[in-house]
Every structure is written in structure tokens, then in C-alpha cells.
Amino acid sequence: KAAASSAPVVLAAESGPTKPTVAVAGATGLIGTRLVEMLIAEGYRVNVLTRNPSAARAKLDTLAGVDAETVAIAGPTQWKSAMMGTKAVINMAGEPIATRWSAELKEEIKRSRVSTTRRIVEAINSMGEKERPEVLVNASAVGFYGTSETATFNESSLSGGDYLAEVCREWEAAANEAKCRVVV
């Protein structure tokens, strides 16, 4: 466990005339907006992969350090080119889960994560080896392990049998199809 005073660990920003670029899906979410700010502060350029470019621009333009030099917004038809040659792709995209779940919302929660991840992976896999990002960092959730009031879980634990575990398994399986290093 890292000491409380340790700085966050990030990919080392390379020196030189061009800033390294990271593509981020889910950049307008609670964690995503903070990640974009942190990446910019660390010297990265960020390519935002979004379904709604105008809404993403409106939200991200309010963040410190965001301008045309630091952040590019890519709609769905531009995702492949926005990922090409990046240092990393970070995927946190998905319908928020902190609400009352209906059958329709549960389907959207799963679909939004799995289909977005598949789309990202298809784009990565269609790139030449030298064009691909070095790594796909794909979000998942502790829901992978299921729930228990008595069990203790670690990364060697098996997946649970409930809805969130199913979502996480499918989400991770989609990410693991990428032809680059995958970190979940």
C-alpha cells in the first residue's frame, strides 16, 4: 500500500516537442473529469472519446487547463483516429449505476459498458501494430466478486453470480480481446 503522502502514479510524460496523448472514454463522468484534469497537469494531451461531442465540450471546457491544445473531442465516427498513436486508451464509459434499477436500466448499464468496450477494442485491433496504443486501461468494479457479508475477496477470488458480477465479466472479457496490453 502506498504511503498517504505519495504522489499519484501516472505514465511518465515524455519530454520533447510533442506531448504524449491519452484517449479517454468516460471523460465527462465523476472520475473522468478529474482524470482529464490530472492528465493535463501531468503534461498529456487528451483525446476524449464521446457519444455526444457538444455536451462533452460544454462540460470539459469548464475544467482548468482545457483548451484546443490540450483536449480534442472525438465523436463515435472519429474514435479510431483519436486512438491511433496514443500512449494509452483509458475506458471508464458506462451508464451511471447509482440510481434505482429497472429492467431497462440494468440492460442499459450492461450494454453501455460492453458495447463501448467492444467498439474501442475493434478500433484498436483494426490498427497496424505501430499505430495501436501501448495499453488499454479498462475500468471494472468490485461488483465482479459478488456480495457477501462474511467473505473476503482479493484478485484471486472467483467472480460472483449476481447481476453486477455478470456485467463485470462481460465488460472485462470484451476488453481482453484487445491486441495490446490490457489492464483491468
Image (tube, grey):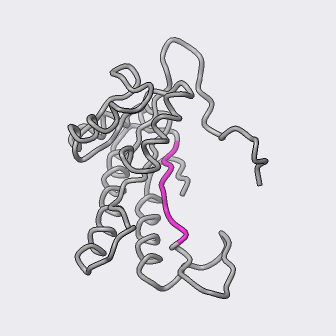
Judged left or right of residue 3, residue 53 is left
- 120, 178: nearer the viewer: 120
Magenta stretch: includes residue 140: yes
Q: Quadrant of residue 75?
A: top left
**60 magenta-colored:** no
Point out the image quarter for the N terminus: bottom right
The quadrant of the image that shows the C terminus is: bottom right
Number of disc labels: 0
Q: Position of residue 181 (x, y in %)?
A: 54, 48
Identify the residue at horizontal 37%, vertical 54% (top origin): 93
**Residue at (23, 44) in percent of width and height:** 76
Q: Position of residue 60 (x, y in %)?
A: 34, 35
- Position of residue 120 relative to residue 57, above or below, is below
Q: In the image, is 126 to the left or to the right of 4? A: left
Q: Nearer the viewer, residue 36 or 130?
A: 36
Q: Position of residue 95 (x, y in %)?
A: 32, 61
Q: Please report the residue visible at 76 percent of the width from the left and 42 percent of the height from the top.
A: 5
**Is 121 rendered above or below residue 85?**
below
Q: Is residue 10 above or below residue 95?
A: above
Outermost residue, top side = 17
Please give the range of residues in magenta.
135-142
In front of the other: 125 or 62: 62
